[in-house]
Image: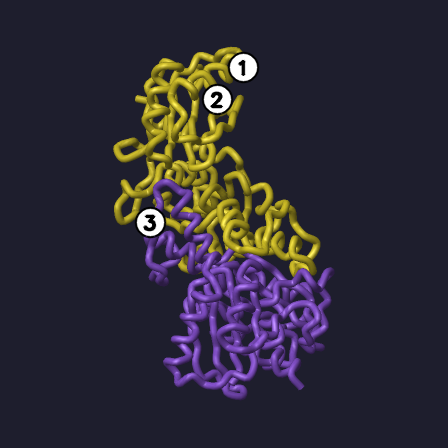
Amino acid sequence: MMLAIDVGNTHTVFGLYDGATLRHHWRLKTTRGRTADEYGVLLNDLLSGVGRPPIRGIAVSSVVPPLTQVVDALCRTYLGHAPLLVGPGVRTGMPILYDNPQQVGSDRIVNAVAAYERTHAATIVVDFGTATKLEYVTEKGEYIGGVIAPGMGIAGDALFERAAKLYRVDLVKPKQVVGRNTVHAIQSGLIYGYVALVDGLVRRMQKETHAPARVLATGGFAPLLAPESETIEETDEFLTLDGLRLIYERNSH
Amino acid sequence: MSNGTFLAIDVSNTQTVLGVYAGTTLQHHWRLQTDIERTADEYGVLVRSLLASVGQPRIRGIAVSSSVPPMTHVIDELCRTYVGVTPLFVGPGVRTGMPILYDKPQEVSADRIVNAIAAYDRTHSATIVVDFSTATIFDYVSERGEYVGGVIAPGLGIASDALFDRAAKLYRVELVKPKHVIGRNTVHAIQSGLIYGYVSLVDGLVTRIQKENKVKARVIATGGFAPLLAPESETIDEVDEFLTLDGLRLIYERNSDE
């Protein structure tokens, strides 16, 4: 079995693969300051819950530098393997045409690799996470770059913290775009607003590259937002884990 | 009343804007930080000295829109003590000339009604106002001049602050339009997300509002980020930095003749 670990700014997701099949997955809060031993106890317990399968390899993507070391120590101490940390020097099979390839967050490359593996065509990946990130991969499978916008969750939090008269609302789609009360007005702004942000960026990217790229979405808010989108064709909650699996395979032969 | 000088005060979450009108002409305007801990005396000294700097016009009336409840009482005291005028606070009971079709009319914040009135006064047709401030607020006015409701989204400024505070590897960038939508470095990627992302949010919401109401409403933008974003927008027809002040002037007039 292979273990994929995706350390994001809000959540850390673990996925256990048997060949190309995702058998189990878990989501933990990303807490800066939590130690390898604390994560070790959690992970051991989760793995025991599924019969303690033998793990022959681990791949990690981390966008939280202080946790990269913690996860590295966790893997060595509790799983007996040095993990493959996606970053400069790791073979991804994808040319990176960014100005400075070392600067691209590993999650962005991992998503691009997973998406292109499915489409083998020009592709835009939308990741609805802490940030909303869009990546562009050319028809030839080159990573070109992308767009980074504030995520819906953190932008919504900011609205409630900073605007005196507004309050937290349930994240559900309102019946109408024009809200006739404050709750509906905020729900509309967050949900239809973020869908519009993504659809508009996707269209601008397609126009700029003169290519009708395929559009795949992932990330925590994808199930809520993708159904309203006019541009997203397919949602895969586990796209990043799948990309980690692919990169692991490309580095182990 | 046209021979008097009128003061409009727009208190929003980040800034408080003051405008001095002679008749319908905005003659002076100032922008102060909104700080709920600052006292009426502190604001009083500022306002008195700003008014003195333009020849101490005699203020005949004041109208205020406040979306920050703790500031309301500070502004009231400031107007009485330092300007000698009891201000008109836009809120329930004030005559606006616009039917409010919100579920609970007293729940709509004053700035939204004020913007709607100023915009409809110009268009006399179905209108969408986009206010780019702490929040990005959309208000829809029907062809007959009824305030129907709107949309509230996080503002560009607070959303970008949240991005830099919460995403470990990202850092603050200058708010300028990048050359390309697809950024080939992190600075350009963030600039694209903030600028083209927010323009897309606005254009997409405007389009959805127009579709829902089956009308090609006029679109007027105001607020601090309007000059940056409106030129990229495909839906905004007009920008007016002082729309809220103008709405306050109109409401003041509607409450003072007769």
Whether labels 2 and 1 share one chain: yes
Label 2, secondary structure: give it.
strand
Residue tagged by mark 1? B54
Q: Is residue B166 left or right of residue B227?
A: left
Q: How crowded is mark 1: few (under 14 residues within 10 Å), some or many (20 or more)?
A: few
Q: Kindly indicate whether the residue at mark 1 contacts the one at mark 2 (C-beta within 8 angstroms).
A: yes
* Circle count: 3
**Residue at 37% from the left image edge and 56% from the top image edge:** A187
Q: Could you tell which of marks 2 and 1 lies nearer the N-terminus? A: 2
Taking depth in this image into account, of A14 and B20 the one nearest to the observer is: A14
Q: Where is residue A152 in the image (x, y as percent from the top left)?
A: 46, 58
Residue tagged by mark 3? A182
Whether labels 1 and 3 share one chain: no
Does residue B242 appear in this view? yes
Q: Where is residue A15 in the image (x, y as percent from the top left)?
A: 48, 77
Q: Identity of the amino acid at label 3?
A: Thr
Taking depth in this image into account, of B237 and B17 the one nearest to the observer is: B17
Taking depth in this image into account, of B150 and B182 the one nearest to the observer is: B182
Residue tagged by mark 2? B20
Task: Please give the letter of the chain rendered in yellow.
Answer: B
**Residue at 35% from the left image edge and 24% from the top image edge:** B74
Label 1, secondary structure: give it.
loop
Q: What color does chain A have in the rendering?
A: purple
